[in-house]
Amino acid sequence: MRGSISRKLYVYFLIVILLSLSIIGAVTFTQSTAQLERQSERYMSQMINSAVYHTDLYLQTYEKASKSILSDSDVMKFVDMEPDNSYDYYFFKNQIEKRVFDRTFTLYPQVNLIALISDKGRALISHHVRQIDANEYDPMEWYALLDEKLPASGGYEIMNTKLSHEEGDHWITLARRVRGMRSHDPHGILAVELNTDEISKLWGNMDLGSGGYSFIIDGSGAFIDKPKQIEEADLLDERLKQKLLGGNKLSFMSSVGDGEKRMYVAQKLESANWRLVISVPVRELREPIHHIQRTIVIVAALTFLLALWISIRFGRSIVRPIQLLTKAMRETEKGNWMQIQEIRNQDETGYMIRSYNLMVTRLSEMIERVYEAELDSKRSQLEVQRIELERHKAEFQALQLQINPHFLYNTLEAIKCYAVVQDSEEIMEMVEAMAFMLRYAIQTNLQDISVVNELKHVLNYMTILQYRSQKPFELDVRVPSELLLYRMVRLTLQPLVENAFLHAFPQGLQEHHYIRIQAEIAGDRFQVIVEDNGEGMPEEKLKQIRRKLELNQLAETDSHSIYHQGGIGLMNVHRRIQMVYGEQYGLTVESALSQGTRMIMSMPFEQSMICTYGGEEHDEH
């Protein structure tokens, strides 16, 4: 933004104030809205939970009443009765109506009608206030209607069905199958017609506001109970009906009828396939939110005006010292070391002006010190470069003084010749083996070595070892001839053999001891194995070695550990194989105490990995 700092300061203050008030207002309004909606939903859920609980209790009461009727022996005998036995019919009719039906009407005043119908056509139908005419109802029509809706398992069903000719639609029927005394198979149906006015009373005490209402629908979407002042078309359409029947407990917003957006909370009863629904207009739920919104807008406007006045006063106190400092800086750019008349402010602006005056006073001294420091730095860098050059020169001279390996070869050959002249076959063999080992060890090529080259190196090592220990010992080599020219990594076999000699037999070599070298193809891998029947190693030591192998370190720092000997060690054998073939290959160790140790080198198996063996390498003299 271009312009003076005062203009920028006022604009930024204005942006900060507006942004802060906007964020605070938006967050407050959003949080308040969400909290009120959650509270409204919780309140409606609590109301519907209470109504569902009491409605379930109400229906379960009449379900228990139907059970007590089913358990009566006369009822069970009635359904077993032959249809043409008039004496038994009138006997059981009098017993059941006086002892069972009348008691039920007395205990449960909401029961309007009780019907007991056998599958053979006999029926007992009793009304709570009047006598039933024999031709008033068709029992078999009722039986067919109820039999179609009842489950075959014998459970009860609460139906949105009216059996009697009573006026109004506040009637439901609880029906269940009846078993006789002689058979466990049902031979009749018990139907109890109930008045739902009591259920409506359970819902009448809920405070749903001026536009709220509640209703009950069955599993097909038909109304069990609905507000009297509202038409069914204004309560539900097909889309909303399917949504309400889609789960056991729902809460959502939707529009129906006149297009007003409403919140619906629905819950399914446990005792019947009914949904109890509460509907409240969203505008009534959000009326407190709109009040909060108006309050936030008024408070934000007053706060903005007050903050704007404070920011103008505050901005002026900052801008004036900065303007004085700007004028002085322009003079300084021209080379005029102009000092500013100090102001009485004790804040950062006053400190800034005093610091500027001090800066002008000391500027020339600081420039001179900078020049001197720069010269000292240059001299120090030259001195460091000179010392570094001398160090590199000393290292180069030390490299030049290293012993030429060919000198060692020629010296060993000379010793061998003297041994021949002196007829000392032992010295000749030791020197010859030493020369071969030295020449083989200093070659830098890791990969282009065959198994037979490594076996020759091990043979030279065995020659020297036998002369040193004065104990003859033979290796058991079981390498198939077709694998002798297979390629492997240089200087990996001899360290494993050396490790076995040093650590497998602490009590000395016995006749039953052996060190075996094997080679085999295992799947897509070529494996060279060094195995012994020595003392092995304990589990903790084996875990320690395996952890070391997982580190993939090229050199082992502890040269006295049991897995590092001969200058290379197990760690370097493992890492050298990985450097040539990849991280998925290397060395694995298997061992058990008193059962020996098995060291396996794994390398890739490919026909192209076979060396083209052209002959022995010759010594260079």
Image (spheres, helix red, strand yellow):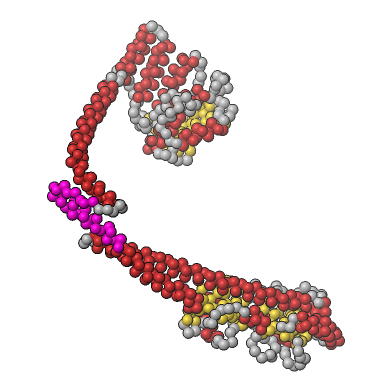
The residue under the point 44% across, 18% down is 463
**Residue 155 at x, y percent in the picture:** 70, 74
* Between 115 and 407, the one nearer to me in the picture: 115
Q: Quadrant of residue 160?
A: bottom right
**Residue 300 at x, y percent in the picture:** 38, 69
**Residue 453 at x, y percent in the picture:** 40, 26
Q: Is residue 336 magenta?
A: yes
In this view, the residue farthest toward the top is 422
Q: Which residues are magenta?
A: 313-342
* Between 314 and 266, the one nearer to me in the picture: 314
Give the left or right position of residue 369, taking residue 539 as reference: left
The residue under the point 79% across, 84% down is 102
Give the left or right position of residue 115, taking residue 269 as reference: right
The residue under the point 50% across, 22% down is 502
The residue under the point 53% across, 70% down is 39
Q: Please determine whether, in this image, residue 544 is positioned above or below residue 13.
A: above
